[in-house]
Amino acid sequence: QVQLQQSGPGLVKPSQTLSLTCAISGDSVSSNSAAWNWIRQSPSRGLEWLGRTYYRSKWYNDYAVSVKSRITINPDTSKNQFSLQLNSVTPEDTAVYFCARVGTTVTTRYFDYWGQGTLVTVSS
Amino acid sequence: DIQMTQSPSTLSASVGDRVTITCRASQSISSWLAWYQQKPGKAPKLLIYEASSLESGVPSRFSGSGSGTEFTLTISSLQPDDFASYYCQQYNEYPLTFGGGTKVEIK
């Protein structure tokens, strides 16, 4: 059974960096059949896919255009986890952030396992 | 990006009712559509994938249908545990996108 456990601060000041981590159990961040994603949810933007990291002989990342200039998703193979960094945050980045797994083929690109969610508030 | 539009945004129903939620895609996504249930304070839970395939452990009162641009999620007999929000998600292409959600409320 795959489990995703999120950690990170719930309050970030404007212009600073939001950092969250998602620890994986029951699967590997280096799996050739999975991609590891960050998604956020807010009343104004709904559920919004932010980006993914995955391994296919080398590491790849894809990011949503809306955050592409500010986001980094990194795998950590030593701890079997992956992280989200979102720079230069504003109050518009206030949301519940989720990590989630998808498969890698078009037939399996739905989110079958999710982290518990972290409410991140951007405020001074 | 593919836009996903759900209707209605809110639905009031009673226990035992048959409930149908619609999801439309801005372009054809074949059958690459998933449905999720979300309860307050929780992560979404996968119900259906590939438009009509029931995820393991999901009650058979949930069913999905459709292809191309029009999809439906049906709950055949609404149970107390089903009062929640429901979201569709296309996975025909990246970026993966979600519908705006349908909240199923007690009538």
Image (tube, coloured by chain):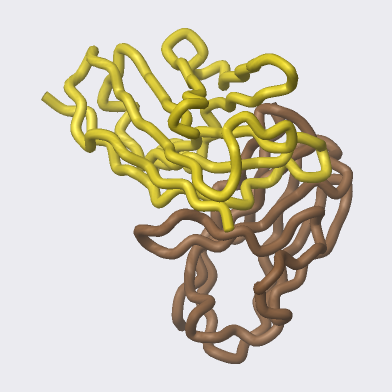
For this orientation, the residue located farthest to the bottom is: B16
What percent of the width, then of the height, locates residue A54?
A: 64, 26
- Residue A82, image x and y in percent? 47, 29
Q: Residue A27's image quarter?
A: top right
**Quarter of the image with the N terminus of chain A in it:** bottom right
A108 and A69: which one is in front? A108
The image quadrant where one finds the C terminus of chain A is top left
Chain B appears in which tint? brown
Residue drawn at x 85%, y 58% as measured from the top left: B66
Q: Looking at the image, which residue sits at the far left? A: A124
> In the figure, residue B3 lies in which quadrant?
top right
Identify the chain drawn in yellow. A
- Give B41 or B69, whichever is nearer the viewer: B41
Q: Quadrant of residue A107?
A: top right
Q: Nearer the viewer, residue B61 or A43?
A: B61
The percent coordinates of residue B70 (x first, y second) are 81, 52
Q: Position of residue A8 (x, y in %)?
A: 28, 35
Residue farthest toward the front in the current orientation of the protein: A78
Query: In the visual, does A47 lie left or right of A96?
Result: right
Q: How many marks?
A: 0
Q: Is residue B95 above or below residue B51?
A: above
- Residue at image x 67%, y 79%? B59
Q: Is residue A65 above or below residue A22?
A: above
Give the residue displayed 75% in from the left and 56% down from the top. B49
Q: Is residue A73 positioned above or below A119 on the image?
A: above
For residue A110, side relative to residue A7 (left or right)? right
Tell whether A78 sits left or right of A87. right
At 48% across and 68% down in the image, what residue appears? B84
